[in-house]
């Protein structure tokens, strides 16, 4: 779906659901009361027995602490600040993070004629299409996306995985690290520290690439197995494999941030939820919401739309729909009790 189609889908849903939606309303706090919850907004207060938190997981950029040591001469942006290459100063750009946002920004900024260095850490490599089908079709058809949260061995890690290196374009192009290398983007390792005005990068690119390639190929083997088991239902092209991510012949381990070669740093290092308005003691020591499949650790409080809430597809629209059925069932039982 294009961005316009997603907006149209949501607008049509609002009309079909006929829910009492309050637009242009900001919730400033949610706190517990004897009978449920008090919700304060900039348009008045509400009282209710139950609250569903559907504010998402990507409210605030998750910028590393080393940002504070970047020389003042360099402009620092997050994806929430960035709009287009024309807003950037002349000079080189360091993009930190090689998940979906990072690779897209590196590609777009490089196409504008600026030298781009991409700092690569842990990442999830996936082709946009596989055997003639969109990769998301395979995730859905094979059942990978339907794996439940209580079936996953390391749930905390699954919920913290980087977003896959996928871009949404009409031509369904694959934008991976090999494509960026071919375009002229310089790849360096994970940014670990700043010392004497120099950014210090890990020398572990080879290991990062090998691990991402290994996981991708294991997933493709899962798809191939599903296709063999389902025969005509798969209706796909023959299996294929992709070139291993190429390791630069010489990857720099440091970059002088005082030399003037880098004028802008874009921190594509992920996002985190913002629960500053939630006055209920349901966050762990790392600020994460304590919940069991969306049932939050407070009576009548629920969550929806978080990564791997109840299934691997929980943060997608069609995944949230399935999760909502389960959460609503629990909520209805709570209200009836």
Image (cartoon, rainbow, N blue to C red):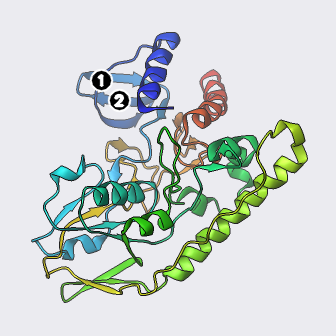
Could one spot residue 35 in this view of the protein? Answer: no
Q: CA distance from mark 2 to mark 1?
A: 6 Å
Q: Out of 178 and 303, give the one closest to the viewer.
A: 178
Q: Is residue 126 visible?
A: yes
Where is residue 282 shown, x and y percent of the image? 47, 49
For residue 65, which quarter of the picture? Answer: bottom left
The residue beneath circle 2 is: 39
Q: Residue pushed farthest left?
A: 73
Whole-percent x and y of residue 34?
44, 31
In the displayed structure, 108 sits above or below 334; it is below
In this image, 198 relative to 136: left or right? left
In which quadrant of the rendered image does the C terminus lie?
top right
Q: Check disc 2: other Cα within 10 Å, few if <14, some if 14-19, many if 20+.
A: many
Give x and y (percent) for residue 214: 67, 70
Residue 49 placement (x, y as % from top left): 49, 26
**Depth check, front residue: 37 or 101:** 101
In the figure, 171 relative to 124: above or below? above
Asked whether disc 2 touches disc 1, contact meaning CB atoms under 8 Å apart, the reply is yes
- Provide the residue designation for mark 1: 45
Q: Residue at x 50, y 59 (%)?
A: 162
Count of labels shown?
2
- Quarter of the figure with residue 265: bottom left
Check the image and report above or below for 90 versus 39. below
281 lies left or right of 130:
left
- Please report the residue visible at 43 percent of the width from the left and 64 percent of the height from the top: 180
Name above or below for residue 4 compared with residue 89: above
Question: Which sits earlier in the primary sequence, circle 2 or circle 1?
Answer: 2
Mark 1 Cα shell of 10 Å, populated few (<14), some (14-19), many (≥20): few
The residue drawn where x is 39% and y is 17% is 21
- Which label sits on residue 285? none
Task: Tell me the SS state at disc 2.
Answer: strand
Q: Secondary structure at mark 1?
A: strand
């Amino acid at each position: 779906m294009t961005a316009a189609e997603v907006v149209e889908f949501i607008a049509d849903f609002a009309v079909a659901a006929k829910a009492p939606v309050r637009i242009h309303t900001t919730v400033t706090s949610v706190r517990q009361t004897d009978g449920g919850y008090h919700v304060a907004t900039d348009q008045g207060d509400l009282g209710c027995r139950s609250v569903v938190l559907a504010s998402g997981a990507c409210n605030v950029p998750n910028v590393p602490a080393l940002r504070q040591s970047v020389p003042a001469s360099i402009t620092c942006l997050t994806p929430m600040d960035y709009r287009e290459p024309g807003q950037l100063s002349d000079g080189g750009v360091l993009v930190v993070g090689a998940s979906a946002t990072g690779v897209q920004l590196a590609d777009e900024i490089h196409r504008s004629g600026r030298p781009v260095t991409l700092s690569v850490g842990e990442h999830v490599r996936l082709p946009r299409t596989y055997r003639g089908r969109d990769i998301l079709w395979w995730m859905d058809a094979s059942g990978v996306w339907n794996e439940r949260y209580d079936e996953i061995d390391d749930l905390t890690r699954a919920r913290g995985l980087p977003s896959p290196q996928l871009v949404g374009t009409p031509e369904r192009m694959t934008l991976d690290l090999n494509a960026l290398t071919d375009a002229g983007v310089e790849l360096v390792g994970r940014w670990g520290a700043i010392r004497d005005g120099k950014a210090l990068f890990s020398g572990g690119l080879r290991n990062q690439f090998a691990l991402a390639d290994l996981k991708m190929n294991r997933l493709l083997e899962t798809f191939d197995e599903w296709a063999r088991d389902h025969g005509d239902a798969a209706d796909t092209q023959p299996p294929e494999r992709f070139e291993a991510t190429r390791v630069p012949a010489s990857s720099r381990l440091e970059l002088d941030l005082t030399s003037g070669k880098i004028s802008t740093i874009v921190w594509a290092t992920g996002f985190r939820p913002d629960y500053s308005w939630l006055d209920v003691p349901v966050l762990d020591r790392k600020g994460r919401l304590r919940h069991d499949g969306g049932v939050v650790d407070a009576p009548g409080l629920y969550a929806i739309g978080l990564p791997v809430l109840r299934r691997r597809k929980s943060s997608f629209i069609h995944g949230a729909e399935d999760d909502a059925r389960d959460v609503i069932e629990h909520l209805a039982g709570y209200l009836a009790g």
